[in-house]
Image (cartoon, coloured by chain):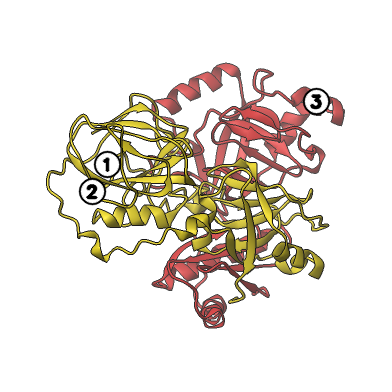
Amino acid sequence: MAFKLTYKPYGERAILVEWTQVIDGDILKDIINFKQKIKNSHIKSLVELKSAYNSLLIIYNKCVNDFEAETTIIDKIYSKEIDFYKTDSLLWRIPVCYHDEFGLDMELISKGKKLSKEDIIKLHTQAIYTVYFIGFLPGFLYLGGLDKTLHVSRKSTPRLQIEKGAVAIGGNQTGVYPNASPGGWNIIGNSPINFFDASKDQPCFAKSGDRIQFYPISLKEHHDIKTLVDAKVYQIESEVIDD
Amino acid sequence: MIKVLKPGFYSTIQDFGRSGFQEFGVPYSGVMDKKAAALANALLGNNENDAVLEITMMGPTLQFKSQTYIAISGADMSAKINNQAIQLNKIISVKPDDVLSFGKLITGFRSYLAVSGGFKTETVMNSKSMYQNITKQFILRKNDEIAILESSKFDGIQNASVKIDSSYISSKTIEVFKGTEFDCLSKNQQDILFSKDFTISKDNNRMAYQLNETLSNNLKPIITSAVLPGTIQLTPSGKLIVLMRDCQTTGGYPRVLQLKESAISILAQKFTGNTISFKLNSKY
């Protein structure tokens, strides 16, 4: 289906395309499809496309001198009825250790929500999360699909240093810190997987539209997987999903 | 090769940055003041985006181990070779064991050191720009050895053709376009942006410059969306945050203004306590 899009100039060299201001799987599909159509149109001055929940920033290598003309071109590409570009979406299975050593805020959430740690782990691991986009930090996946029971406000004072691999909850979102950084989300565990590898052509294994499911591991398994990851021999489990 | 005797306050290798990797959350990085870096490179006949050393506030002390030519543009930090003052925007021949040092900051905030052929440090994702967790090193350290080319004869274009205009360094006018949420502001709030002076706060670095004066507002956060260097975000507490080259790729605050590319160079030469004023470019 076609959505009603809004086009806005963004500085000298970019145009922002916006969808309705809601987080929605159908909008995500529409954005992914539009991105692919634009890529296939081989616009010479196009540098890159950056998508988020309900927006797509089109970045050019020259000034957009005629905004109206440029948006007409873009909108024509959007309304092209031809080919729906189906790319395979993958479901990635991500190991997470929820042990107290990593789950710094587990106790707090457990008390606040009157849920046992086991319940929290169960709720966090049974959901299948959708990767909306990557942003904020290199390799930080914006995931949709956190169970409502686990929605918990961000910490009033952010931590200055959060460990690489920390699995956290902030508001209605959950995510994994790909590298050590400051952050205000509540930490419930840690994943030994690399979410960003600058030495690879595709530095992130996941892409917009993919799915993520977490599964619990012990401290020992965390250590063992980390060893394999560091030796660059660990393979993340994944399967193609049909949607 | 260049040996780092003292690293200075914050010195990094930068080129024009890392484009094409925004969809993986990778910041652009790159020189804060493109104009100055391009000038230093042009003087030497380099490509404008060859890697240079970006020097902030207080310069390093560097010892050359090879013969080469250098040029320094941007902020005036009283550069010296072997304790003899040298001029900005000039081609300078250096020989092995010469020591480049800096003194008092006279104008601007960031200086750019270019060498013949550009710095030959590691390239990650098509760029030599240093950034934490992307390049092995994100700041110059004492005793580092930086690779450069040996250059015994000057083969650049003589500088007759290079136009030098450093007036932007002391300019306080920051040209901006409307941001994507500009229209959500009231007429009064919009007027304040273009009538008041704003002061650079102590929180200013390669990621962002925060301004001291606030703009009271009742704008709701936006659903996380794209941001770029030069985007001015308005926080719920009324703080204005000007994103710079190392900024994150997405953000959740309303984007009220967007700096013109050339204004990023002007702002890059400002520091704590300096004042600026915004001038609207109504092209869009």
Neighbor class of circle 1 (other Cα within 10 Å; few <14, some 14-19, many 20+) is some
Q: Determine the chain carrying the residue at label 2.
A: B
Q: Position of residue B19 (x, y in %)?
A: 43, 55
Q: Residue at left 29%, top 42%?
A: B119
Left or right? Give the position of A219 relative to B12.
right
Marks 2 & 3, CB-CB < 8 Å contact:
no
- Say which of marks 1 and 2 sits in front: 2
Chain letter of mark 3 equals A
Q: Residue at x 19, y 42 (%)?
A: B68
State whether residue B256 appears in this view.
yes
Q: Are marks 2 and 3 on the same chain?
A: no
Dot 3 falls on a residue whose secondary structure is: helix
| Residue position marked by numbered label 1 in the rendering | B120
Residue kind at label 1, given as amino acid type? Lys
For image coordinates 75% across by 32% down, the residue present is: A157
- Residue A108's tag is 3
Q: Nearer the viewer, mark 3 or mark 1?
A: 1
Density class for disc 2 (Cα within 10 Å; few <14, some 14-19, many ≥20) is many
The residue identified by callout 2 is: B117
Spatial CA span between label 3 and label 1: 50 Å
Please give the chain letter of the residue carrying mark 1. B
